Amino acid sequence: MLHHLSREHKQRALTEILRVLVPGGSFHLLDLGRPVSTWDRALARIAFHSPEVRDNIEGRLAALLRDAGFEQVEEEMARIQAP
């Protein structure tokens, strides 16, 4: 759902998530990410042109998490294909 938020609201949400996270706890984020193939990039340019989604498709989520204070940020890329 982060892709629906402005960058300012993403930063505020991530800061608040970290604030309420139990010490030693973990936060797992699943959202749109950076397109990996030529086809994905072309589709993203057509389908996801709103400013809110730009951070996601340009691969900035990890940096936003670090900026919010998360210390251990790991990215995993997965491509979901239709049946």
Image (spheres, rainbow, N blue to C red):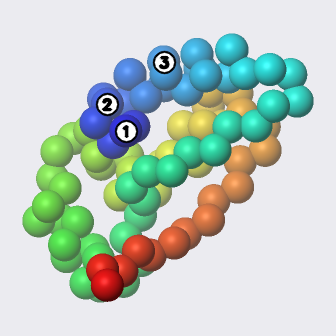
**Residue 36: which quarter of the image?**
bottom left
Tags 3 and 1 touching, CB below 8 Å:
no
C-alpha separation, residue under disc 1 versus residue under disc 2: 8 Å
Q: Which residue is mark 2?
A: 5
Residue 4: x, y in percent?
Answer: 28, 36
**Residue 14: which quarter of the image?**
top right
Residue 26: x, y in percent?
Answer: 76, 37
Tags 1 and 2 touching, CB below 8 Å:
yes
Choose the circle earlier in sequence order: 3 or 1. 1
Image mark for residue 76? none
Which residue ends up furthest to the front in the rendered image? 83
**Mark 1: few/some/many CA within 10 Å (<14, 14-19, 20+):** few
Q: Is residue 34 left or right of residue 68?
A: left
Which residue ends up furthest to the right in the rendered image? 24
Q: Residue at x 43, y 59 (%)?
A: 33
**Residue 6: which quarter of the image?**
top left
Determine if residue 35 is in view: yes
What amino acid does circle 3 point to? Arg
Mark 1 or 2: in front is 1
Image mark for residue 1? 1
Q: Is residue 42 left or right of residue 10?
A: left
Question: Please, what secondary structure does the residue beneath circle 2 have?
Answer: loop
Between residue 35 and residue 83, name the one nearer to us. Answer: 83
C-alpha separation, residue under disc 2 versus residue under disc 3: 10 Å
Between residue 46 and residue 23, name the one nearer to us. Answer: 23
Choose the circle earlier in sequence order: 2 or 3. 2
**Mark 2: few/some/many CA within 10 Å (<14, 14-19, 20+):** some
Question: Please, what secondary structure does the residue beneath circle 3 have?
Answer: helix
Q: Residue at x 30, y 48 (%)?
A: 54
**Mark 3: few/some/many CA within 10 Å (<14, 14-19, 20+):** few
Q: Which residue is mark 3?
A: 12
